[in-house]
Image (cartoon, coloured by chain):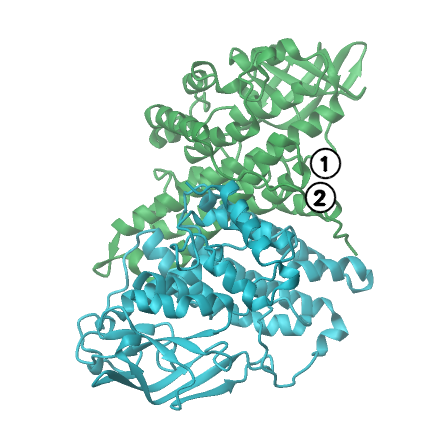
Chain colours: A green, B cyan
Amino acid sequence: MSTQPDLLYSEEEEALRAAVRDLLTDHCDVAGVIARVESASPHDPSLWKALADGMGLAGLLVPEDRGGQGATPREAAVVLEELGRAVAPVPYLTSAVVATEALLACEDGDELLAGLASGRRTGALAVGLHTAPGAAFTTVRLQSGALHGRLTGIADAAVADVLLVPADDGGLYAVEADAVTLTPQTSLDLTRPVAEVTLDGARGHRLGDAEPAVRRALRAGAGLLASEQLGVADWALTETVRYLKDRKQFNRPVGGFQALKHRLAQLWLEVVHLRAAARGAADALATGEDADVAVAVAQAYAAPVAVRAAEEALQLHGGIGMTWEHPVHLYLKRAKADSIAYGTAGAHREALAGLVDLRAP
Amino acid sequence: MTDAAELRRRAQELLAAHPPAETERLDFLRARFDAGLAWVHFPEGLGGLGVPRSLQVVVDAELEAAGAPDNDPRRIGIGLGMAAPTILQYGTEEQKRRFLKPLWTGEEVWCQLFSEPGAGSDLAALGTRAVREGEDWVVNGQKVWTSSAHLARWAILIARTDPDVPKHRGITYFLCDMTDPGVEVRPLRQITGEAEFNEVFLTDVRIPDSRRLGEVGDGWRVAQTTLNNERVAIGGMRLPREGGMIGPVAKTWRERPALRTHDLHQRLLKLWVEAEVARLTGERLRQQLVAGQPGPEGAGMKLAFARLNQEISGLEVELRGEEGLLYDDWTMRRPELVDFTGRDAGYRYLRSKGNSIEGGTSEVLLNIVAERVLGLPAEPRTDKDVAWKDLSR
């Protein structure tokens, strides 16, 4: 490796972060999220409109001449950090990153790409959320020009206008949401629910080859998910530190007890490491240099840290952390679901074994 | 304004006046110091030019390309990393002129007389006494974990000058002559078999008051400069992928398929990822320093490296199977240089046990992170307002 990745945040990236954080502070309070996730509409359409259309963030990864903002995965990663910090129930990762990256790999996807980039339309890649970048994925049957099959675990399908469906002819098809039957699945992570998609003779528009599009989409999803996980972990750490300075037992703030301080310091150290790994993946996706390794490293590291951060937050909050009313469970569920999304840490370690030549026995 | 181009010009001037091929090593190093190219961030006249530290690489690259000798920085790390910045900040003009040049050229090696058998993590509780007698201080006590004491000409020393005030306030900082007849250096053998460190016994050592650094009773504050610079030195390393302890393990794994098991494979991959992320974290810290935005991340780097070194070298011994039952050499030696990745897996495993103890134990570092970075409350203290002489020990 000749050059080192740029692991810092630029001034523009910090300005973007501040703008997203301001919007989320005003429009995405956790009490609202807790109330919303059990309603008929767990996603927040007005927040999504403000982010995607109002701020133009849905088009960050799309070049300007194809209707986007012409930014890079580095900026999208900053947005995802903030969305993770707020467990915002919006389809940013699934539409503005994964579906968008799939379309960027297709020859005939530009019209839809421009629609997604503008925020007027929302897309979802119809591949199970658990699928790792190198893993096999389910396809539907193409028969007499119509698509037939059942796909499960499709994240944010409930709010997608259009689904990108891989078929058994090797093509990726754009299928309008109203042409399929969509059945919400009871999801562990209520802020990013998954659904079952049934196609019963649905018509689709062939966008291009599925294989490279899905690979590219899942790699970008896995790499940038690390930034979301960083946001989740950072919230868990910050909130727990704040609470333990305030919470008193035995006539002292409990954050003064060494047994707890050491756990928090250890967690801080892991979050610091996660930040470097997540920036490494975002920068590698932006430059294209060393991206497979950087993404696998980030995902192999990020998931256990985010899960542990949320679990520590719950434990160190004591009884209140176990209640539905306290937001820590939203972060725990997001972190746990994220640890499966786009491949588990173990799947990414297995990928690394091949990438860096540390072969199995 | 001295910029990179000007520094290159000065380096070329030095090389022209003292061609490395025809100049004695020490003469070249002295001339380099006099030209202000030793440590460019130091003031003029003291080996520097008062320019940003980041420009040092320009000079180093220019001189290295011309085949000029360096001052063998690994041999004199304590002098360069700890004694020099402290002398620069607190020394008198006379002290700076006397000590900095031979320190930098390596003519005079330095060691550090801080830790004591009774003062490890609680360094401020140290009991080595310095008593004023006329123009001298008379020092008695025992220091421990002193690298290079057997090679050193000088030592930075902290000693108790006032036992009647709380421990942090009664300490004074000295520059101690290691050739004084009252200084006795004994090797301290470690679990690796070698003696990289020493015990130093101080018996009626006389230090003139002119070798006091900083005010009487202000030694704890002076020592903070020394200790902070130790941590800067630890955080500044730049590594390629597989540059640390993971390198030899990965190499063995690739070269010797017969040693592989599924269990070891899972553990190796996990540690490989952690080592790579630690490397990226160190690189990010370095980029922050270069960009002039130092973050608090440095406080944790040593914690991470200590644990990783221990786990990786532990795995390596196990990976080697039957050979893991062997050790390369238990002979008692006194190495001049410390190389954590040198020698065999067994040595690495044993030596890395010290990584979570030396330069601040991992437990103390976790407290520092918790209190200074996260702002969590300190433990209630029972020693703050008690005179040192009344502390329990």
Say which amino acid is labelled 1.
Gly
Residue at the far front in the pictured view: B17
Q: Amino acid at mark 2?
A: Ala
Q: Who's the residue at 70% across and 62% down the image? A: B248
Residue B311 image position (x, y, % from top left): 59, 64
Which one is nearer the viewer's eye here, B85 or A180? Answer: B85
The answer to whether marks 1 and 2 mark residues whose Cβ atoms lie closer than 8 Å is: yes
Q: Quadrant of residue B231?
A: bottom left
Say which quarter of the image contains residue B232: bottom left
**Where does label 1 land, which residue?**
A134
Q: Is residue B319 above or below residue B190?
A: above
Q: Under tag 2, what secondary structure?
A: helix
* A258 sits to left or right of B242: left
**Residue B103 visible to an observer of this rendering:** yes
Residue at the image point whose x is 37% and y is 65% from the top: B226
Residue at image coords 43%, 85%? B179
- Quadrant where the image shows the N terminus of chain B: top left
Image coordinates of residue A109 in percent, x first then y, are 67, 13
Residue B270 at least partly seen: no
Q: Position of residue B363 (x, y in %)?
A: 41, 66
Task: Tell me the subunit letter for badge 2.
Answer: A
Q: Residue at x 57, y 69 (%)?
A: B352
Residue receiving disc 2: A351
Nearer-the-camera pick, B99 or B160: B99
Labels 1 and 2: the sequence-earlier one: 1
Q: Are marks 1 and 2 on the same chain?
A: yes
Q: Secondary structure at mark 1?
A: loop
In the displayed structure, does residue B206 sit left or right of residue B4?
left
Q: Quadrant of the C terminus of chain B?
A: bottom left
- Chain containing mark 1: A
Foreground residue among B42 and A234: B42
